[in-house]
Every structure is written in structure tokens, then in C-alpha cells.
Amino acid sequence: MLPPLVADMNIAVPVVQFLRAQGVDVVSAREEGWHSSEDKDILREAHAMKRFVLTHDSDFGTLAIHRNQPFTGIIYLRPGGRPPAQVITDLQDLIDAGIDWTPPVIVVYQSGRIRLRLANK
């Protein structure tokens, strides 16, 4: 199972619907009206809610690692701009992978490959 999530603005509505149907606790930045929020604000809000950010945007990793912004976790799906059905397949792979989601961790998923980066916090 995936951890509680905040779906970034670039995560399509059908993807959020799929996650909810799988029983994943997900808050959508789009539904919350965070359209004008910067990435740092979304990361901060997700951390305050003890949620991972689900995104196609590498800026979240930069904020967490290089700018030392506190975070609970980040799931970065590469590349962005793919159809929701492909993103859903990727997420099913992550659900099935049995990952230890103990925070803080950054997960990068691309083409069937999962990379974990544990943060030293």
C-alpha cells in the first residue's frame, strides 16, 4: 500500500480516482484549490499533514535535498506528460513493490525501475 499522499497539480484526476479506489488516502492539490501554490508551499503543507508528495516534478527533490526543506516523502514519477493509464500502471507497480515507506524517503520511478533515496534527517 502507498502512504498517505498529496497529489501535485500535475497528477491527473483519473490517477487520483484510481488511488482512492485502491484505498490510498490522497489529498489532491487541484481539489484543494492550491493552483497558485509554489512547490515549496505544497511540500511544506504535505509535511505538516505527514503525507508524501506524488508528482512528475523534480523540483520537489531539489527542495528537499539541496535546500533542506523538511519533508515526509516524495514519489517522483518520470517522465511527466504521459497518459493517466500509463501512470496508473506505474503506481500499481509501486503498490505491488512492497516498499518500506518509513519517512523521510524519496522514491523515483521510471520505466519499471524504482530508486529509493533515504534522507539523513
Image (cartoon, helix red, strand yellow):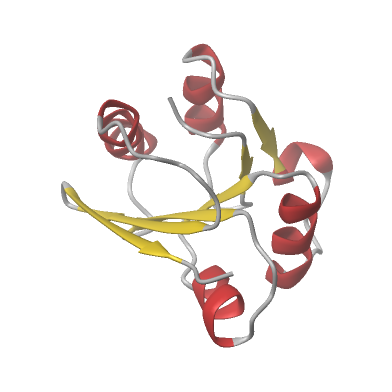
Figure check: 104 above or below 23: below
Answer with left or right where residue 28 lies relative to residue 48. Answer: left
Q: Which residue is rendered at x = 46% and y = 71% of the image?
A: 58
Answer with left or right where residue 72 lies relative to residue 109. Answer: right
Q: Which residue is rendered at x = 39% and y = 40% of the image?
A: 100
Query: Residue 116 appears at what percent x and percent y?
Result: 33, 58
Query: Residue 72 appears at what percent x and percent y?
Result: 62, 54
Query: Residue 7 appears at what percent x and percent y?
Result: 60, 44
Query: Residue 14 appears at what percent x and percent y?
Result: 50, 28
Q: Which residue is rendered at x = 78% and y = 56% of the image?
A: 35
Q: Quadrant of the C terminus?
A: bottom right
Figure check: 83 above or below 76: above
Q: Quadrant of the N terminus?
A: top left
Answer with left or right where residue 98 lies relative to residue 41. Answer: left
Q: Residue furthest front?
A: 121
Figure check: 71 above or below 19: below
Q: Which residue is rendered at x = 53% and y = 45% of the image?
A: 11
- The answer to which quarter of the image holds residue 117 is bottom left
